[in-house]
Amino acid sequence: MTLSLAAISGKLGCPRPLPPCSPSLQLPGDPFKIPQDPTLLIGSSLQATCSVHGDPPGATAEGLYWTLNGRRLPRELSRVLNASTLALALANLNGSRQQSGDNLVCHARDGSILAGSCLYVGLPPEKPFNISCWSKNMKDLTCRWTPGAQGETFLHTNYSLKYKLRWYGQDNTCEEYHTVGPHSCHIPKDLALFTPYEIWVEATNRLGSARSDVLTLDILDVVTTDPPPDVHVSRVGGLEDQLSVRWVSPPALKDFLFQAKYQIRYRVEDSVDWKVVDDVSNQTSCRLAGLKPGTVYFVQVRCNPFGIYGSKKAGIWSEWSHPTAASTPRSERPGPGGGACEPRGGEPSSGPVRRELKQFLGWLKKHAYCSNLSFRLYDQWRAWMQKSHKTRNQDERILPTGRRGAARGPAR
């Protein structure tokens, strides 16, 4: 029995996944070498022949048939060339249904396998792109990339991340793949600072190879860090609309010259929508205002270390810290219809001043604010309001009812 294959290139097809292909087959006593495992472009045509010469006894071409991935091929795709040879013609081949190849097998009448071959049908790799890298605390480098625009090659495609110092040094190959996804690699150590690196990705399969553009970067420009530790959220006295947030700078970078900026996000307990506070600057504390009284809030903080040793790049945001929960105090003010009025004795009677203070208070309640000046102004204003209100109440309790009118002066 012999098997031979021939192929003609063509165009694109449409694959579907199936179980893996078996290795090439050779039965004991076969008078031929292991059948070839051809690699073809999608859309190619294939011609194969299967011949028997008295093994098994009495076998003829009329009793032979073909299967592809275990499925019997229609008889009209085959034709008998002579008493011992059956030919097969496949046109416009689709991509391999699995990266291990498609199993094309010739069978005897009783279903026994006479010979077979794995067909690898696919595309050469396209140029990888969109390489991005980051360094965790300047101790390593992790990169990821996007395969070519087509993406799927239907063949096993090997991706290698290469890197070297820009002006000298030899090429190095990253060894820890799939660390943060299918197309990623991690370089754990032995990285130089203050010297640019050249980084690129090479893609290779049975039909060819492709190389990405070279990315040039300095480790100091792509530093990220751990999320800020020790995030604490607490109440601000009895203020029912505020919470205080404090945290610690990333300890891994404490010995390096760098700046940092922070972001806060928070949400109520029964919501998935986060509100982000961007204007935290480089402080390690912030007060959230305009919150709902008697409500549980989850708060997270993240850090962007930038300007490390004078780097001009913007830096890379860390992951968010673990959520920290705290609740605002319940409001002691009676709600609508409660039968009581909120005292107004602490509010100034002057129209313009009153309007300005109300505008100031309204702005603070609508925004999370992190300025120390805002803290002082707002706290002073609230303290003045509380003191004024307390003094007014005491005066009204001291003065007998009959003398309150006199204290106000004669009516006009």
Image (cartoon, rainbow, N blue to C red):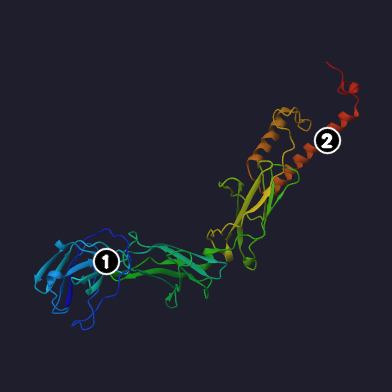
> Image height check: is 350 above or below 229?
above
Q: Secondary structure at mark 2?
A: helix
Q: Are marks 1 and 2 in contact (CB under 8 Å)?
A: no
Q: Position of residue 110 (x, y in %)?
A: 20, 71
Residue 371 visible in this rendered orientation of the protein: no
> Image height check: is 324 above or below 353?
below
Left or right: 311 with respect to 172? right
Residue 238 visible in this rendered orientation of the protein: yes
> Image height check: is 47 above or below 390?
below
Name the residue carrying label 1: 70
Within 10 angstroms of label 2, few (less than 14), some, or many (20 or more) residues? few
Instruction: Tell me which amino acid carries mark 1.
Output: Gly
Q: Quadrant of the C terminus?
A: top right
Instruction: Name which quarter of the figure residue 322 lies in.
Output: bottom right
Name the residue carrying label 2: 390
- The numbered mark, 1 or 2, whose residue comes first in the sequence reads 1
Residue at 70% over, 35% down: 357
Q: Position of residue 172 (x, y in %)?
A: 43, 76
Query: Which one is nearer the viewer's eye here, 87 or 320?
Result: 87
Instruction: Name which quarter of the figure residue 346 lies in.
Output: top right
Q: How many marks?
A: 2
Instruction: Name which quarter of the figure residue 335 lies in.
Output: top right
- Spatial CA span between label 1 and label 2: 90 Å
Q: Position of residue 380 (x, y in %)?
A: 76, 42
Residue furthest out toward the top: 412
Left or right: 158 with respect to 338? left
Query: Which one is nearer the viewer's eye here, 31 or 134?
Result: 31
Query: Which one is nearer the viewer's eye here, 97 or 373?
Result: 97
